[in-house]
Image: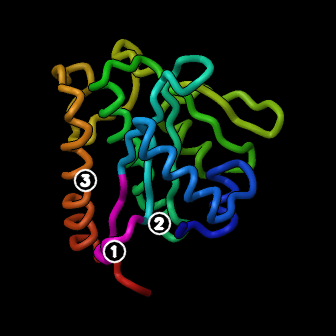
Amino acid sequence: MRLDAESRRDRFNGYADEGFIERYAAKCAGDGTIILAYFAEDGAVHAAAELHQPDLSSDSLPEIAFSVEANLRRKGVGSTLFKQLIAVASSLGYERLRITTGSQNQAMRALANKFGAHLTFRRGESTGTIDLNPSVEAPNLAADGRNLEATEEVPADAAKALIDFNQACWALFLRMSGGGKAA
């Protein structure tokens, strides 16, 4: 709900009113979507990364999506959430992720490319995949700096622990960087 109109359009690839967002959030809460959130010192969510289950897509690939408030872009928030989401997806045994965004969403396209997405453009959309196979050379993607090739098996409930830990990490980061304060 905190996204401005342009950010909402970019995130949902079209118009999204508050009713649509409420229905979307309720659906995600009930279908197994894993959501990692960026909390500021005010306790509000200012960015989120979503990992949608593979059985919800037509190509059986888990899909990822991101929402970052405009004032937090290009400050590492999206990259940090991306790293954490890839670590969770890897711990769940996923080998590839699908990402879809509007062709006008330059911020998301740049972020996806940074993490090795192979995007194609058709009918106003950018769609692509990210290969999580550790034999493919990729940036160090583990949220805590570990190489994914050395990541041990992690139980599925690690995602919940990561979400719980996420808020504390962001609060510490904000205090250290001076971010998260009202302008």
Q: Is residue 106 above or below residue 154?
A: below
Q: Residue at x 40, y 85 (%)?
A: 182
Q: Is residue 63 above or below residue 168?
A: above
Range shown magenta: 37-45
Where does label 1 land, which residue? Answer: 179
Residue 146 drawn at (x, y percent): 20, 33
Badge 2 element: helix
Residue 42 painted magenta:
yes
Q: Residues within 10 Å of mark 2 (few under 14, many from 20)?
A: some
Between label 1 and label 3, give the one nearer the viewer: 3
Where does label 2 land, which residue? Answer: 72
Where does label 3 land, which residue? Answer: 166
Disc nearer the start of the sequence (1/2):
2
Instruction: Tell me which corner region of the image, top left, top right, bottom left or bottom right, holds residue 99.
Output: top right
| Alpha carbons under labels 1 and 2: distance apart | 9 Å
Quadrant of the frame with the C terminus:
bottom left
| Alpha carbons under labels 1 and 3: distance apart | 16 Å
Render colour scheme:
rainbow
Disc nearer the start of the sequence (2/3):
2
Q: Residue most toward the bottom? A: 183
**Three-letter amino acid code at the position of disc 3:** Asn
Q: Would residue 130 be visible to someone looking at this image? A: no
Q: Residues within 10 Å of mark 3 (few under 14, many from 20)?
A: some
**Three-letter amino acid code at the position of disc 1:** Gly
**Three-letter amino acid code at the position of disc 2:** Leu
Badge 1 element: loop
